[in-house]
Image: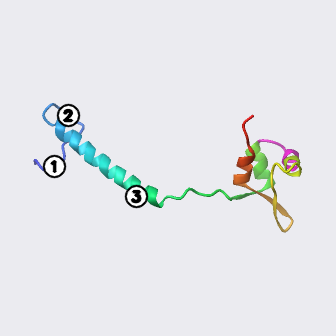
Amino acid sequence: MENSKPNPNKVDHINFPSVIETVRDDMAQIKAKFDAFLKTFEPKQSDELLTRNEVKNILKCDLSTVHNLTVKKKLKKYGIGNRVYYKRSEVEAAIKPL
């Protein structure tokens, strides 16, 4: 039974060094998996298209305010047919600290 992992829930002065070694091994495995994940991770680009009502809900304002922000070129609108859309990333970028 000497080859089995020590129980980290039962730590005493005798098995403390082996528990620490087990924790180090586990942390090394977690770090290796995390590093491998980071190599392939690509943040999601938020070019999701939003309707005027969705923008209104995000900004917590009226449709007239969304219209006024568009007229003042604070928000850029995109159209498909006769529908108006806004890019989420641009709406979020338009929000600035005062």
Q: Which residue is mark 3?
A: 36
Q: Position of residue 62 (x, y in %)?
A: 84, 44
Q: Which residue is mark 1?
A: 4
Q: Residue at x 81, y 57 (%)?
A: 77
Q: Earlier in the sequence, mark 2 or mark 1?
A: 1
Q: Position of residue 20 (x, y in %)?
A: 23, 39
The magenta stretch spans which residues?
60-67
**Label 3 Cα neighbours within 10 Å, binned few <14 / some 14-19 / many ≥20:** few
Task: Using the image, determine if residue 41 lies above or below residue 57.
Answer: below
Q: Position of residue 68 (x, y in %)?
A: 88, 47
Q: Which residue is mark 2?
A: 11
Closest to the camera, between mark 3 and mark 2, is 3
Residue sticking out furthest to the top: 13
Q: Position of residue 80 (x, y in %)?
A: 81, 67
**Label 2 Cα neighbours within 10 Å, binned few <14 / some 14-19 / many ≥20:** some
Task: Using the image, determine if residue 50 lies above or below residue 7.
Answer: below
Nearest to the observer: residue 2 or residue 29: 29
Q: Residue at x 40, y 58 (%)?
A: 36
Per the image, label 2 sits on a secondary structure element best described as loop
**Marks 3/1: CA–CA distance:** 28 Å
**Marks 2/1: CA–CA distance:** 15 Å
**Marks 3/2: CA–CA distance:** 32 Å
Q: Is residue 72 left or right of residue 45?
A: right
Residue type indicated by callout 3 = Ala
Per the image, label 3 sits on a secondary structure element best described as helix
Residue type indicated by callout 1 = Ser
Residue type indicated by callout 2 = Val
Q: Residue at x 18, y 35 (%)?
A: 16
Per the image, label 1 sits on a secondary structure element best described as loop
Q: Is residue 50 left or right of residue 21?
A: right
The kind of secondary structure the magenta stretch mainly shows is helix
